[in-house]
Amino acid sequence: MALKIGKFSIKHPIIQGGMGVGISWDKLAANVSKEGGLGIISSVGTGYYENQAFVDKEIAGKPYEALNFYSAKALKEIFKNARKICGDAPLGCNVLYAINDYGRVVRDACEAGADAIITGAGLPTNMPEFTQDFPDVALIPIVSSAKALKIICKRWTQRYNRLPDAVIVEGPKSGGHQGFTYEQCFMEEYQLENLIAPIKEEIAKWGDFPLIAAGGIWDKSDIDKMLELGADGVQMGTRFIGTHECDAHENFKKVLLQTKEDDIQLLKSPVGYPARGVRTNLIKMVEKREGPAIKCISNCVAPCHRGEEAKVVGYCIADRLSDAYMGKEDTGLFFTGSNGYKINEIISVKELMNKLVYGEND
């Protein structure tokens, strides 16, 4: 069943969630697109790509300021290398709304050749402003409620005469940052299966565009369940970490292979939202206030207020996510969805897509 998003047709209704720093870059995203899904390149921390080969300035071995942490040159190189794998198959980019330089990074992604922009971590009420020179690029906001979608549709219609090309509804079992409070993540009314119907109703008030369900989706039976509930497709992030092509360091994959269900928890984050990840050595150190020194070099997200929130929480998210990307198990922050403990082998993207589409040997 194909998924139509804007001017693009995705053979299988599966979007691979954008994961940064460096978990879904050229190799993973391109191979998902090549196999008929929609691969998503993460724009987070592109300055670390290829050992910071595209960074103009660094301090203490880290990309300096948002201009280098979200390196335009690196993002273009990632897309260029991805296109060598997937050709002209649809390929997207995830740009978090909470980052510094949001508008600039959206434009960078469009110029790099993104066919779709996905934005979560805040309400992207001005997203179309940065893509007006790229009318064919599909715009896909992530929401966690019908109210959020209503605000976006109202603003986009009034200001830009534009509606989303699709909307991703993310429930509280996803990896990384949540669109809910800690308490809401465990309440029945905020679970993904209960969010779909009211958001479908909201979509109907504005027109007709696809609803993509995300958060805690693991196998073909989960996908079928979401489609039965009214979703047009799904977004999956964590499961794709268990692939050979995933850009994550082998140590990152090893951490998940060794993770047990109880190890996956909601953590405090400098971004201001609860975030789901693995309780590793870093988290234990942070709880004792013995974590690595906090020095805001990359200035990555606006809500952190130049490291002030990082000091409150006890760690710098840019530094700790980049450590995970580089395979530093002691100081890395390893985000995962609630099903991350189910990863028990590393397989190819092709094999995984076959499992998800046809239910082979799952």
Image: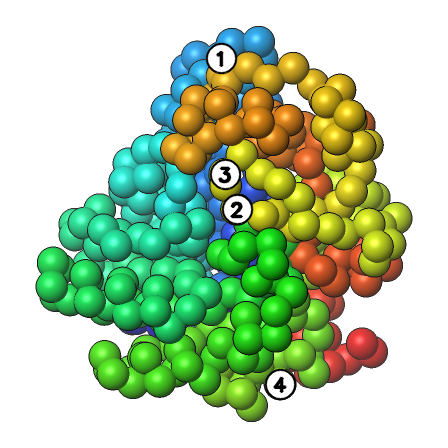
Badge 3 amino acid? Val
Residue 296 tag number: none
Q: Work out how far the residue at label 2 is from the one at label 1, CA to CA, in angstroms.
A: 28 Å
Whether residues under marks 2 and 1 lie with C-beta atoms below 8 angstroms apart, the answer is no
- Which circle's residue, 4 or 1, is located before the other in the chain? 1
Label whose residue precedes the other's in the sequence (1 or 3): 1
Query: Mark 4 and mark 2 in contact (Cβ < 8 Å)?
Result: no
Please give the label number shown on residue 271: 3
Q: Secondary structure at mark 4?
A: helix
When the figure is inspected, residue 198 is found, relative to residue 40, above or below; the finding is below
Mark-to-mark CA distance, 4 and 1: 47 Å
**Residue that numbered label 4 is attached to:** 225
The local secondary structure at tag 2 comes to loop
Q: Nearer the viewer, residue 199 or 323?
A: 199
Residue 273 is marked as 2
Q: Residues within 10 Å of mark 3 (few under 14, many from 20)?
A: many
Foreground tag (1 vs 3): 3
- With respect to residue 313, does 227 lie above or below? below
Q: Is residue 199 left or right of residue 156?
A: right
